[in-house]
C-alpha cells in the first residue's frame, strides 16, 4: 500500500514520529495476528488497550440501534485504534473488524501511560491525532447536512483516494490524477459513510461512472480523473 507516497494524503500515526521515537514505541505491547472477519475491538467493551496496526486493513463500525450498524471509518497499517479507551475515556465506542490478514500490536494502558509521560514526541503525536479525528468528525457532521448525496459521495471518494490510493504508473512516473483505491467497499458501506441509502449511492456511483470520473466493479473503485472528482466534491482543484 502506498498511502505514504501521496502528497495530498494524511499521514498515519506511525508516520508522524521520528525513527527513534517509532523504534521505542515499537517495543511496547504484544504482537498479534488476525484473520479476515476477526474482531480486534468490541463496541461497549471496557478493555483499556491501544491497538497499533502494522499490516492490513480494518473497518470501524458503530451500532445505531439493535438492527443497524454504521461504517464509521477505515484504518490501515501505521494507524492506531482504541486510543480513547486506552487513555481511560470510557468503554469502547466502536467495533473494529479485520478486512484481511492483519498484524498488530496490543498495548495495555499500564504500558502506554508511563511511556507517553516519558516520550513527549509520541504524546504530542497522539494529541495531534486525536484533534485531527475530532475535526474530521465535526466536518463530516456538517457535510451530512450541508451537501446532497452526490457531493458527499465525491468527498468520501476523494478522501479514500488521498489516504489509501495507488496512483497509476506511467513512463513519466506516478500519475496521481488516476488512482486505484486500495479499499474494498460495498455499496451499502458507501451508503453508511455518506449517511444515505444504498439505492441513492448506487445512482450517484453510476452517474460518476457515466461521466467517466470513476470505474467500479466487484467492490473495487478506481478514479479516472481526480481533478474532476474534486470538482464534483466542490473542493478546490490545486493548480498544476
Image: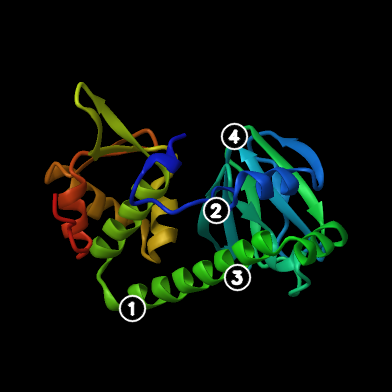
The residues tagged by marks 2 and 1 sit, at their Cα atoms, a distance apart of 32 Å
The disc at residue 100 is 4
Q: Earlier in the sequence, mark 1 or mark 3?
A: 3
Q: At numbered mark 3, what does the secondary structure look like: helix, strand or loop?
A: loop
Q: Earlier in the sequence, mark 3 or mark 2?
A: 2
The residues tagged by marks 3 and 2 sit, at their Cα atoms, a distance apart of 36 Å
* Dot in front, 2 or 1: 2
Judging depth in this view, the residue of 15 and 182 nearest the camera is: 15
Crowding near the residue tagged with mark 2, few <14, some 14–19, many ≥20 C-alpha atoms within 10 Å = some
The residues tagged by marks 4 and 3 sit, at their Cα atoms, a distance apart of 27 Å
Q: Name which residue lies at 20% across and 39% down.
A: 224
Across and down, in percent, residue 19 comes to: 62, 44
The disc at residue 65 is 3
* Dot in front, 4 or 2: 2
Q: Earlier in the sequence, mark 4 or mark 3?
A: 3
Q: Earlier in the sequence, mark 2 or mark 1?
A: 2
The residues tagged by marks 4 and 2 sit, at their Cα atoms, a distance apart of 25 Å
Judging depth in this view, the residue of 161 and 92 nearest the camera is: 161
* Dot in front, 4 or 3: 4
Q: At numbered mark 1, what does the secondary structure look like: helix, strand or loop?
A: helix
- Please determine whether, in this image, residue 121 is positioned above or below residue 131: above
Q: Name which residue lies at 81% across and 47% down.
A: 29
Q: Residue furthest right?
A: 110
Choose top left, top right, bottom left or bottom right for residue 130: bottom right
Crowding near the residue tagged with mark 3, few <14, some 14–19, many ≥20 C-alpha atoms within 10 Å = few
The residues tagged by marks 1 and 3 sit, at their Cα atoms, a distance apart of 21 Å
The residues tagged by marks 4 and 1 sit, at their Cα atoms, a distance apart of 33 Å
What residue is pinned by disc 2? 16
Residue 56 seen in this snapshot:
yes
Q: Earlier in the sequence, mark 4 or mark 2?
A: 2
* 47 sits to left or right of 223: right
The disc at residue 145 is 1
Amino acid at each position: 500500500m502506498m498511502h505514504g507516497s501521496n502528497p495530498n494524503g494524511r499521514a498515519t500515526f506511525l508516520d508522524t514520529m521520528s525513527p527513534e521515537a517509532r523504534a521505542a514505541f515499537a517495543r511496547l505491547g504484544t504482537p498479534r495476528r488476525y484473520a479476515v472477519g476477526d474482531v480486534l475491538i468490541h463496541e461497549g467493551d471496557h478493555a483499556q488497550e491501544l491497538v497499533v496496526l502494522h499490516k492490513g486493513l480494518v473497518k470501524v463500525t458503530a451500532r445505531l440501534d439493535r438492527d443497524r450498524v454504521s461504517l464509521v471509518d477505515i484504518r490501515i497499517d501505521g494507524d492506531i485504534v482504541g486510543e480513547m479507551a486506552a487513555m481511560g475515556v470510557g468503554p469502547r465506542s466502536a467495533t473494529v473488524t479485520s478486512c484481511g490478514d492483519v498484524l498488530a500490536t496490543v498495548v495495555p494502558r499500564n504500558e502506554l501511560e508511563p511511556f507517553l509521560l516519558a516520550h513527549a514526541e509520541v504524546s504530542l503525536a497522539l494529541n495531534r491525532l486525536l484533534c485531527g479525528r475530532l475535526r474530521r468528525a465535526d466536518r463530516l457532521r456538517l457535510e451530512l447536512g450541508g451537501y446532497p448525496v452526490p457531493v458527499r459521495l465525491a468527498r468520501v471518494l476523494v478522501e479514500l483516494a488521498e489516504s489509501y490510493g495507488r496512483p497509476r504508473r506511467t513512463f513519466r512516473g506516478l500519475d496521481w490524477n488516476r488512482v486505484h483505491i486500495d479499499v474494498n467497499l460495498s455499496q451499502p458501506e458507501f451508503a453508511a459513510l455518506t449517511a444515505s441509502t444504498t439505492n441513492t449511492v448506487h445512482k450517484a456511483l453510476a452517474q460518476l461512472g457515466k461521466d467517466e470520473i470513476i470505474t467500479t466493479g466487484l467492490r473495487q473503485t478506481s478514479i479516472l480523473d481526480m481533478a474532476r472528482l474534486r470538482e464534483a466534491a466542490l473542493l478546490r482543484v490545486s493548480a498544476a
